[in-house]
Image (cartoon, rainbow, N blue to C red):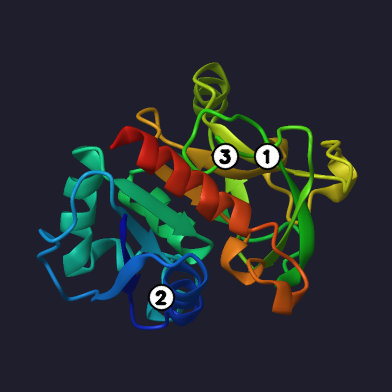
């Protein structure tokens, strides 16, 4: 499986992602500069990653300017053809700005930047990054964002629920979804969603920051392993 990590001005998790995919997971990976327009070297079954950071300094709205970068037309075409696209933190914001995922990420309810470990419960196993996860477990994954409060209309929320598109919810260490552990005021404790075709994923927490023993936490690695396992089955 081949991965591409898109780099926008202000991206700061691109090298973290490159390291985890290439060195930890042992997969082919290359950086994609935001001004590129050709990603024909990626096939359906490969994955384009939109990493965390502060693309274009988070001016206007987080992800708004990046959603109009030259590369994004190719990323959107790739997603619409069935290729995997995974947006993390700022990448999730960009996916919502492009319309590849519904809803928006708003300023945290506390009006403050939040940086800490949280726990995630896989809300479904019907996505490539959750298929191999334990739905009864809380996975410890770091967050670091100021605008991570997922918001959508009642109609969109009902649609997400009815099509099983919520992939992660903030939870307690033992996997219970409660209002008390919601770190940013996100609706329904939503930490990540997928599209109806189940090939585009967006999440606020950073699994690439929890994928090595040297960091004291490998819970994030399970998400990469799940994606690779599903992709391998499809070959």
Secondary element at image label 1: helix
Q: Nearer the viewer, residue 235 or 181?
A: 235
Going from N to C along the chain, the mark reached first, 1 or 3, is 3
Q: Which mark, residue 130?
A: 3
Q: Residue at x 32, y 34 (%)?
A: 234
Q: In the picture shown, does residue 5 fall above or below 124?
A: below
Res. 69 image quadrant: bottom left
Q: Position of residue 111 (x, y in %)?
A: 72, 66
Q: Is residue 105 visible?
A: yes
Q: How far apart in space, not on screen, are marks 3 and 2 (Cα)? A: 27 Å
Quarter of the image with the N terminus is bottom left
Q: Which mark, residue 209?
A: none
**Is label 1 in contact with label 3 (beta carbons under 8 Å)?**
no
Which residue bears the numbered disc 1? 187
Q: Which mark, residue 55?
A: 2
Secondary element at image label 2: helix
């Amino acid at each position: 499986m081949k991965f591409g990590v898109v780099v926008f001005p202000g991206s700061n998790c691109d090298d973290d992602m490159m390291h985890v995919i290439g060195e930890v997971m042992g997969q082919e990976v290359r950086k994609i500069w935001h001004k590129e327009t050709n990603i024909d070297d990626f096939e359906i079954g490969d994955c384009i990653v939109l990493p965390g950071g502060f693309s274009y300094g988070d001016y206007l709205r987080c992800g708004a300017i990046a959603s109009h970068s030259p590369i994004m037309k190719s990323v959107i075409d790739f997603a619409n053809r069935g290729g995997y696209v995974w947006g993390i933190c700022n990448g999730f914001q960009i996916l919502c700005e492009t319309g590849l995922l519904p809803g928006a990420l708003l300023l945290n309810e506390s009006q403050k930047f939040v940086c800490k470990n949280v726990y995630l419960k896989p809300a479904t196993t019907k996505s490539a990054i959750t298929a191999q996860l334990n739905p009864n477990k809380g996975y410890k994954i770091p967050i670091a964002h100021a605008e991570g409060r997922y918001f959508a209309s009642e109609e969109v929320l009902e649609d997400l629920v009815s099509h099983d598109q919520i992939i992660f919810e903030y939870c307690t260490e033992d996997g219970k979804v409660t209002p008390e552990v919601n770190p940013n005021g996100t609706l329904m404790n939503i930490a990540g969603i997928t599209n109806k075709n189940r090939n585009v994923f967006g999440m606020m927490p950073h699994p690439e920051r929890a994928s090595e023993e040297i960091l004291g936490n490998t819970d994030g690695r399970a998400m990469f392993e799940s994606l690779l396992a599903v992709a391998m089955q499809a070959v």
